[in-house]
Image (cartoon, rainbow, N blue to C red):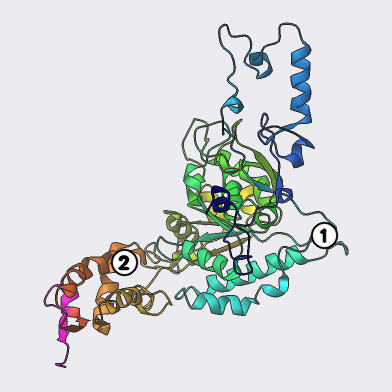
Amino acid sequence: MSEQDFYEVEPTEDTVGTTDIPEKEDPEEYDQICYMCRRPERVAGKMIRIPNDICICQDCMQKTFDAMNNPGFSMNDMMGMGKIPNVSMIDLTNFPGATPYQPKIKKKKKEEKQEPVIDIRAIPAPHKIKASLDDYVVGQEYAKKVMSVAVYNHYKRIASDVDDGVEIEKSNMLMIGPTGSGKTYMVKTLAKLLNVPLAITDATSLTEAGYIGDDIESVVSKLLAAAENDVDRAENGIIFIDEIDKIAKKKNTNQRDVSGESVQQGMLKLLEGADVEVPVGASSKNAMVPMVTVNTRNILFVCGGAFPGLEEIIKERLNKAASIGFRADLKDKYDKEENLLTRVLAEDVRKYGMIPEFLGRLPILFSLEALTEDMLVRVLAEPKNAILKQYQKLLAMDEVKLEFEEAALHSIAVKAKEKKAGARALRAILEEFMLDIMYEIPKDDDIGAVTITKDYIEGTGGPVITMRKCR
């Protein structure tokens, strides 16, 4: 066979269409980004393409020509650096194979061809949303009902027609509950059921613009990343801001509150709905990161926090009603009430340190119940991905059956309540007791079943080991 025959192979019927060549992305689907000012095409206007697949907007190109026509021109002047002796700009495009990194931003679809991103018929009714949440979240009936109705009404608002002059307001939510009660888990489950982009962020790192920390717009940037830089999908997503109580006004401080009240002030327009310029693929703005405009009008904001110390404010308000006389309530009447947070009002949260303007943009205020012993037992066994089912699946891979006595489950729940960490304590306790079992069982192929007893949990006995029957 000649060298030419070796390299040139005629396609046959068997080989046509069988090669695994990845489909090329349509360049028309993405916005071009200016190599100099890093603005996308939708902001900077039509781009001029030069070799090495570099795009420059008309403004930057004009500035380049103006600078070159100016006597004493230098590249440092054009880049805003002034004249620096013995310093010249390095042109990276002269290096072979060097192509500048260009983040991809999907173009917004044209109005005449644009289809609704959210199909209201695909969003289930509130009772169906709650039924789906019941499979994963134990208890919290009121909270699940509130979230189901609020989310359903929010997506009806997106699909509604404003031609009749009636515009539905946004239904942002403020969720209050003790640690480990399922705030974050409920929002995660909800976004999974609805198949919409979800960004979960933490308010502890947010600061006022210009200070060390994350800018307020970074929460929208995370949602854009969750939507794979598709602005249309991101503008109909859900943002869950956890630890919202950490941006409460600091009491007795004479310094500027850059991570407290200032953050609340900066979030007002974000919650209400505004055009926000956010960096693509980064948490902070800088000259090398492209910017894109996202409208937050149809983004649902869910804020959650444990608000430690809020119970004392609620008790103070409740005790004010009758504190003198024969019919006065005892001051310690509410000390042993676990679900005191369910009596929360907006004025209690305002006294805690949240400004009225911020609370006004979170019209739906509700709280989650503290987990009782019976609820913790249900959390162990009932949900689809319950902790016990996870361990049973792990041991089933070793062909061993794992069982738990009812009394053992209650003992685990009692230990978890003592830790005061909610459902998170269950995993820590089970890891401790299952360690030896998970270590020893793979040693012996004759073990057929393991039963966790109350005595083993309380440290007065051991698990019941059942051997396989002789074959």
Could you tell me which quadrant the C terminus lies in? bottom left
Name the residue: 60% across, 25% down.
94
Where residue 37 sits in the image (x, y, percent)? 68, 30
Where residue 464 sits in the image (x, y, percent)? 16, 83
Regarding mark 1 in the picture, which secondary structure is present there? Answer: loop
Please determine whether, in this image, residue 62 is positioned above or below residue 402. above
Amino acid of disc 1: Lys
Please determine whether, in this image, residue 77 is positioned above or below residue 459. above
Regarding mark 2 in the picture, which secondary structure is present there? Answer: helix
Please determine whether, in this image, residue 229 is positioned above or below residue 251. below
Magenta-span inclusion, residue 457:
yes
Residue 325: image quadrant is bottom left
Considering depth in this image, is 180 or 281 the residue closer to the camera? 281
**Where is mark 2, residue-wise?**
427
**Where is mark 1, residue-wise?**
113
Considering depth in this image, is 129 or 254 the residue closer to the camera? 129
Which class describes the residues within 10 Å of circle 1: few (<14), some (14-19), or many (20+)? Answer: few
Amino acid of disc 2: Arg
- The segment highlighted magenta reads 455-471
Q: Which-is-in-front pick, marks 1 and 2?
A: 1
User: CA–CA distance between discs 1 and 2?
Assistant: 50 Å
Dot placed on the residue nearer the N-terminal end, 1 or 2: 1
Horizontal relation, residue 25 to residue 421: left or right: right
Q: Which mark is residue 353?
A: none
Name the residue: 52% across, 35% down.
257
Name the residue: 67% across, 12% down.
74
Where residue 80 sits in the image (x, y, percent)? 65, 18
Is residue 354 visible from the viewing direction of this image?
no
Considering depth in this image, is 142 or 271 the residue closer to the camera? 271
Where residue 79 sits in the image (x, y, percent)? 65, 19
Is residue 451 visible from the viewing direction of this image?
yes
